[in-house]
Image (cartoon, coloured by chain):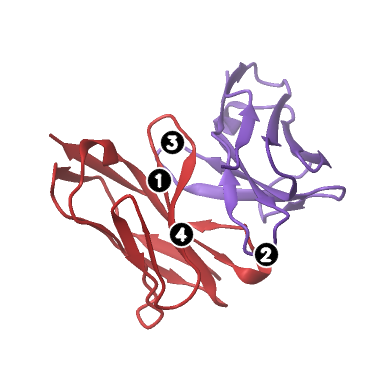
Amino acid sequence: GNSVTQMEGPVTLSEEAFLTINCTYTATGYPSLFWYVQYPGEGLQLLLKATKADDKGSNKGFEATYRKETTSFHLEKGSVQVSDSAVYFCALTLSDSWGKFQFGAGTQVVVTP
Amino acid sequence: GAVVSQHPSWVICKSGTSVKIECRSLDFQATTMFWYRQFPKQSLMLMATSNEGSKATYEQGVEKDKFLINHASLTLSTLTVTSAHPEDSSFYICSAKGLAGPTDTQYFGPGTRLTVL
């Protein structure tokens, strides 16, 4: 079956620190990969995505590269802000069932001033 | 950008009653909507796929008679939790896929928090 594994949180960082959240996946086909962010009390927001191997998704200073050889899609940001405090979900969907997402467990990130 | 709304945003009900949650795509037509539930501090779990004009497809372990889904139009899907019990208390989130094609972006609603007393 398909699954997404991401590092457990919470991850606590100081402002301007470097953030990495690891995400690996297993899939029966060729998935598209996503990072979603959920701020307290809000719904999911798409942060970035990549639809094929070696693609790099980027948005708001966050980046993630689709690595087929390591089945990974790690999220990185060079300098976090307090406003980046949220829960981050790695997810995949397959082309033959597009929109049907398999989510990772979520990683809570807390950025302190 | 595209917006998906849910109503209500939160609801409290007594055990044994039924609750209806609406999911609307506000500025695009959605042939397919998905319903997820999220328990506190946990990930989202897909419950069912809702297709306009046809029966919903439920994931394994989800009771279709308990979680009734109706996708009556291209902009509205409803989830009715029938005879709700405290263990049904959760955060219910819908997402909608537009008509633009198989790789069209999925949009998530803000969620509905259900508390069953």
Mark-to-mark CA distance, 3 and 4: 22 Å
**Label 1 Cα neighbours within 10 Å, binned few <14 / some 14-19 / many ≥20:** many
Residue B40 got which mark? Answer: 3
Residue type at mark 4: give it: Phe
* Front: mark 3 or 4: 4
Q: Colour of chain B?
A: purple
**Label 2 Cα neighbours within 10 Å, binned few <14 / some 14-19 / many ≥20:** few
Decide: marks 3, 4 in contact (CB < 8 A)? no
Helix, strand or loop status at disc 1: strand
Most distant residue in the front direction: B1
Residue A37 got which mark? Answer: 1
B32 vs B59, nearest the viewer? B32
Q: Colour of chain A?
A: red
Instruction: Specify the subunit that label 3 lies on.
Output: B
Q: Quadrant of residue B80?
A: top right
Tell me: B43 left or right of B67: left
Q: Is A69 placed above or below A13 here? A: below
